Amino acid sequence: MTSIYIKSLNKNYKSSKNIVKAVNNFSLTANRGEIIGLVGPNGAGKSTLVKLLCGILTPTDGDIEVLGLSPSKNRTTLSKDLGIMFGQRSSLWFNIPVKESLLLMKDIYEVPNDIFYKRLKTYAEKLNIENLLSTPVRNLSFGQKIRCEILATILHNPKLLILDEPTIGLDIVVKNSLRDIILDFSKENNSTVILTTHDIQDVEKLCSRVVFINKGEKQIDLTMSELKEILKKYSVIEIEKINGIDSFKNEFKQFYREETSSHMRFCIKQEDTKLFINTIINKFGEDIIFRKVDPNLEDILYAYYN
């Protein structure tokens, strides 16, 4: 069953000098139960697309349906089946206990009492926040607040969960907890999840598909299985930084990915790896330190960021 249908969607903004195409001829179909990672650089059009899905923005032209409805024309009706969380914005009231905000949302979404308290107990336990429900939001740490935000977002069992940078600024323990609850929620309720993120591990650990957007255009739309097959075709070589290594980076700039204070990182096709390593040794001697590691999603998508 289709949750999202987008065909040739455009969203333009007029500036004093020209027209900015925030979303440009974008098409996408998502089925129930899919978790789709929407990735791309800042300003790529991710947040604009999310706002179009929610009905906050009206498209310039093209077709968009969410759960069989036009988001901008049926925003109130659609909102009952949507769960939306923006990483930098809160749906909880700052000066009152978390549970009071949740009770208000129970009434807004018309969740029956027995169902509400059953879900509250289940999800609060999974998120390990049972002892925080009586705490005013202002007294929560950032990580605690985000877990409570997730609880508020899923209590009405939305058919479509839209998460905009949900793990930004969180430590690894809280990130893993958040990923677990998102994955469990989608599986248990057959809910579709659209996840915008800069955290590649979010995509690798959660998503069944990855869609890469840049300059408002869809660049890649692959299942994770397809993407993993692509990953198998590449190796990453990390080389210790020594004198002269900068010239090597320039010589192989098509393979270069990044550098830290200690090493440089290159992404090479498997069939070219042996030649690349031999070139390193011939140029810098056998004492140079390097290692071969598996590539990640960011290594493969690097070219699309430009």
Image (tube, rainbow, N blue to C red):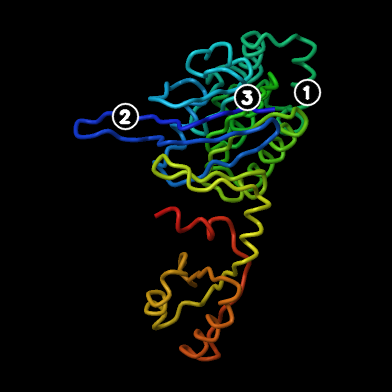
Residue on which disc 1 sits: 121
Camera-nearest residue between 28 and 161:
28
Camera-nearest residue between 75 and 122:
75
Question: Which is more foreground, mark 1 or mark 2?
Answer: 2
Badge count: 3
3 or 2: tag closer to the N-terminus: 2
In the current view of this chain or complex, which residue is farthest to the left?
17
Element class at badge 2:
strand
Quadrant in the picture for the C terminus = bottom left
Amino acid identity at mark 3 = Thr
Number of residues whose C-alpha sits closer than 10 Å to that of mark 3, classed few (under 14), some (14–19) or many (20 or more)? many
Number of residues whose C-alpha sits closer than 10 Å to that of mark 1, classed few (under 14), some (14–19) or many (20 or more)? few
Give the percent coordinates (x, y) of residue 299.
Answer: 53, 60
Give the percent coordinates (x, y) of residue 259.
Answer: 45, 67
In whole angstroms, how far apart are the C-alphas of marks 3 and 2? 30 Å
Residue on which disc 3 sits: 153
Q: Specify the label residue 44 is tagged with.
A: none
In whole angstroms, how far apart are the C-alphas of marks 1 and 2? 45 Å
Q: Residue at x 48, y 71 (%)?
A: 264
Give the percent coordinates (x, y) of residue 86.
Answer: 52, 30
In whole angstroms, how far apart are the C-alphas of marks 1 and 3? 15 Å
On screen, 260 above or below 20?
below
Question: Which is more foreground, mark 3 or mark 2?
Answer: 2
Q: Tell me whether circle 3 and circle 2 mark residues in contact (CB < 8 Å).
A: no
Residue on which disc 2 sits: 13
Q: Residue at x 55, y 35 (%)?
A: 28
